[in-house]
Image: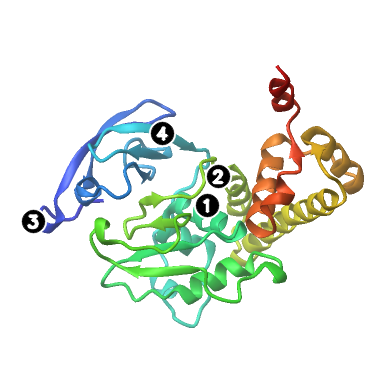
Amino acid sequence: MIKSMGKDDMSKEVELTCPTCQTFRKIKVPAAIFSQKKFGTIKIQVPPGAVCREHQFIAFVDTKGIVRGYERIDLLMAVPTEETKEADNKDKALTLKQLIRKYGLYGVFSLLHAKIFDYPAYIIKNKESEDTPIKLNEFLDKNLPEKYRAPTFKIKFLDETSYDKIKVKEKNALLIDSQQNILQTPWEDKLKFEESMLKKALEIIDDNEQLIIIQQDIAKFIKEAELAKTILEGVKEIYKEDLIDEMATQLKMPKINKYRLNLIKDFIIQRHSDKLAKRIKNKVQEFLNLL
Ligand SMILES: [Zn+2]
């Protein structure tokens, strides 16, 4: 995380506690994160080995260097460090493992989330890096059914600059810096869907088979979302519970949980229409309105 203590590369110590095993350690974080006013709290990815041996997590650190919270990543995986030569072969498509090495696990969850839910995303790239967004977009697009693939590149690269000078058109964009820190996310939920997908995929060694697992999981989710959309188009409004029942009947599947339904709602808002998503009603809320 820290290379030198030169004038432009100062670092600050932050006290972190592993949210799983409570191991405590001071780690050095680039001071640039704290001198900025633009993003406020930043999500720092803490890989296994940085604080404790086994666990990895996200630390929410504010501009004073105070930790505002943690989010566990329940995925035990040593980030592969070898095969860099082959990895940088320009003609070869990216693999999931390479992507994790570049952006961190949480970075990959976030990029996938942005892609599925159609949020704009920006990656600040290092001056020395020759990365282009083409391969990254190709990789992410491949995971989605054809009609949801972007005709234009949605994930863009920005040249490195001080945080306060970063200019991004859209307010609801994902923003990742060159140190794998997450500066901004347009969502608040935990990325459990993406985490469980990657957990399954990483149990498999073969790069292509890993992708197939992700493609299948996303395709299944989109199939559910499209059915929900069709049901919503035929009603004025519907209770959450009734929509879940109706979907289970039509798909001949066990009922989905509320978390999954909220994801579907987000998908409909982002990909189709806000109005359609608002037809989903909440029983408790309506009851409270009557009081
Ligand atoms: Zn730990």
Q: CA distance from mark 3 to mark 1?
A: 33 Å
Where does the image place residue 75, in percent across and percent down from the top left? 52, 42
Say whether mark 3 is within 8 Å of ligand 1: no
Q: CA distance from mark 1 to mark 4?
A: 16 Å
In the rendered image, the vertical position of residue 177 relative to residue 128, given as above or below: above
Which residue is label 3 attached to?
7
Q: Secondary structure at mark 2?
A: loop
Disc 3 residue crowd, few under 14, some 14–19, many 20+, Cα 10 Å = few
Tell me, yes or no, if residue 80 can be seen here: no
Furthest residue in direction top, as rendered: 291
Earlier-in-chain disc, 3 versus 2:
3
Residues marked 3 and 1 touching at CB (< 8 Å): no
Which residue is label 1 attached to?
109
Q: CA distance from mark 4 to mark 2?
A: 14 Å
Image-based side of 19 in relation to 215, left or right = left
Furthest residue in direction left, as rendered: 7
Q: Quadrant of ligand 1?
A: top left
Q: What label sits on residue 191 in the rendered view?
A: 2
Q: Residue at 69% across / 21% down in the picture?
A: 288
Q: What label sits on residue 208 in the rendered view?
A: none
Which residue is label 4 attached to?
70
Q: CA distance from mark 1 to mark 2?
A: 7 Å
